[in-house]
Amino acid sequence: MADAARDGSLPVADRWFDVTEVTDGIYHVTEPHVHAYVRSNAWLIRGRTAHLLVDTGLGVGALAGELAALLDRPVIAVATHAHFDHFGGLGEFAERAAHHDDGEVLETAADYVTLRAATYPVALLDEFEAAGEPVPDLLIDAVPDPAFDLAGFRTRPVGITRWLTDGDAIDLGDRSLTVLHTPGHSPGSICLWDARSQTLVSGDVLVDGEPLLDQLPRSSPADFAASLRRLADLPLQTVYAGHGPVFGRRRAHEIIADYLSGRD
Ligand SMILES: [Zn+2]
Ligand SMILES: [Zn+2]
């Protein structure tokens, strides 16, 4: 941490994002100073002809600048879904892709947050309550730079330049990922599937260590179950989720079985 912010309320982070290469050409990007409940994982997958950035965090720090050294090809930035903790930085990128069924929420930032508790979405307040956690006054514990406008921040609406549908291929030259429309958490939730490496980027559809959220305002438990049954049929080896740790096939099947038990 460097100096305190100008208003003295929060320290200034030396670095806003944490960026780690987890395997050859795949980078984990997260925001250590964001409250754990809204701290998401973004995944940068570098390819020979293009790079794919899956999710973009809260939008507090400048993500494109942080990743600049890794972005030496055109970048396709994708939102797995329209929750504010996943698409905050999407507007920093020229090519911005998402599924149409979450499009209106992205383009109007209908689920926006400010950083102050007074405007947290009800679903987030419910999560704090369910966990027995006090609701924090701020969603961050540092600011990215001394001039950051803490009071004025809100999730920004973002125009989508490419609508994704189920089965679309995102070609990176030496790898290709297939869009899977996996509604349930939200109507437009997608996963990205690399059949060659048997890798799934799962957004909030398949997450380890946290409940699968199917009671949010636009959630559908029936759709969620159908999406998980579909994922269970994939020969997946590695899952890069929207929150929490990376996990493998066995854990994926446990999570899916837990969710589906009692629903069939
Ligand atoms: Zn979500
Ligand atoms: Zn999330």
Image (cartoon, rainbow, N blue to C red):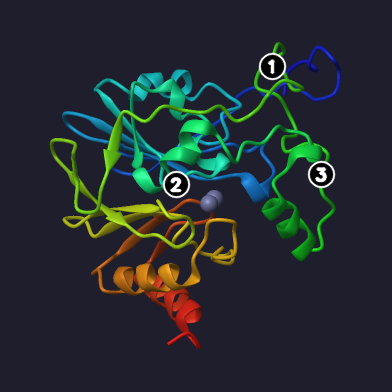
Helix, strand, or loop for circle 2?
Answer: loop
The N terminus sits in image quarter: top right
The residue that appears at 56% across and 63% down in the rendered structure is 213
Where residue 204 sits in the image (x, y, percent)? Answer: 48, 56
The three-letter amino acid code for the residue at tag 1 is Phe
* C-alpha span from label 3 to label 1: 19 Å
The three-letter amino acid code for the residue at tag 2 is His
Q: Is residue 28 visible?
A: no
Label 3 crowd bin: few (<14), some (14–19), many (20+), radius 10 Å: some
Where residue 123 sits in the image (x, y, percent)? Answer: 68, 54
The residue that appears at 29% across and 38% down in the rendered structure is 163
First in sequence: mark 2 vs mark 3? 2
* C-alpha span from label 2 to label 1: 26 Å
Query: Which label is found at residue 148?
Result: 1
Label 1 crowd bin: few (<14), some (14–19), many (20+), radius 10 Å: some
Query: Which label is found at residue 136?
Result: 3
Label 2 crowd bin: few (<14), some (14–19), many (20+), radius 10 Å: many
Q: Which of 48/123 is in front? A: 123
The C terminus sits in image quarter: bottom left
> Height in image: 200 above or below 111?
below
